[in-house]
Image: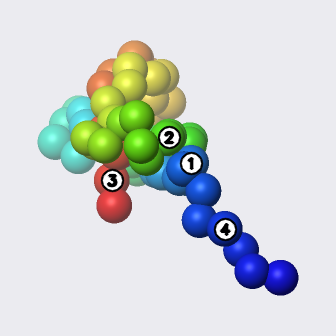
Amino acid sequence: MASKKGARLIITIECTECRTNTNKRTSGVSRYTTTKNRRNTTARLEIKKFCPHCNTHTVHKEIK
C-alpha cells in the first residue's frame, strides 16, 4: 500500500516566554502538537495558548 502525502502536517508549537524567562513558576518548556494545512498556511504558525510553566496565556510558535 502506497501512502499519500496529504495536505495536513503534524507540527509542534513551543512557548516563546519559557525560552527567555528565568523567573517562571516551574522549569521546562511548554509544547503542544497540532495540525496545519500546508497549502493554505505556508508561514510558521503562531497561536496564543496556556503555558503551565509560566501560568499564563503566551504566544506559542511553530518549531521544526
Give the vertical position of 40 relative to 31 (above or below). above
Q: Which residue is mark 3?
A: 63
For the residue labelled by badge 2, is the local secondary structure a helix, a strand or a loop? strand
Q: Residue at x 31, y 43 (%)?
A: 42
Q: Which residue is mark 1?
A: 8
Amino acid found under the numbered disc labelled 4: Lys
Estimate the spatial distance between the alpha carbons at disc 2 and disc 3, rounded to whole Å.
13 Å
The N terminus: image quadrant: bottom right
Residue 15 in the image: x percent, y percent? 34, 38
Residue at the image point whose x is 50% and y is 40% from the top: 36
In the image as oriented, which residue stretches furthest toward the left? Answer: 20
Q: Which residue is mark 4?
A: 4
Residue 61's tag is none
Relative to 34, say whether 2 is above or below. Answer: below
In the rendered structure, the answer to whether residue 26 lies left or right of residue 42 reads right
- Look at label 2 and name its amino acid: Lys
Label 2 environment density (alpha carbons within 10 Å; few <14, some 14–19, many ≥20): some
The residue that label 2 is drawn on is 36
* Sequence-wise first label, 3 or 1: 1
CA separation, marks 2 and 1? 5 Å
Q: Residues within 10 Å of mark 1 (few under 14, many from 20)?
A: few
Disc 3 versus disc 1: nearer the observer: 1
Is residue 9 shown to the viewer in this render? Answer: yes
Marks 2/1 in contact by CB < 8 Å: the verdict is yes
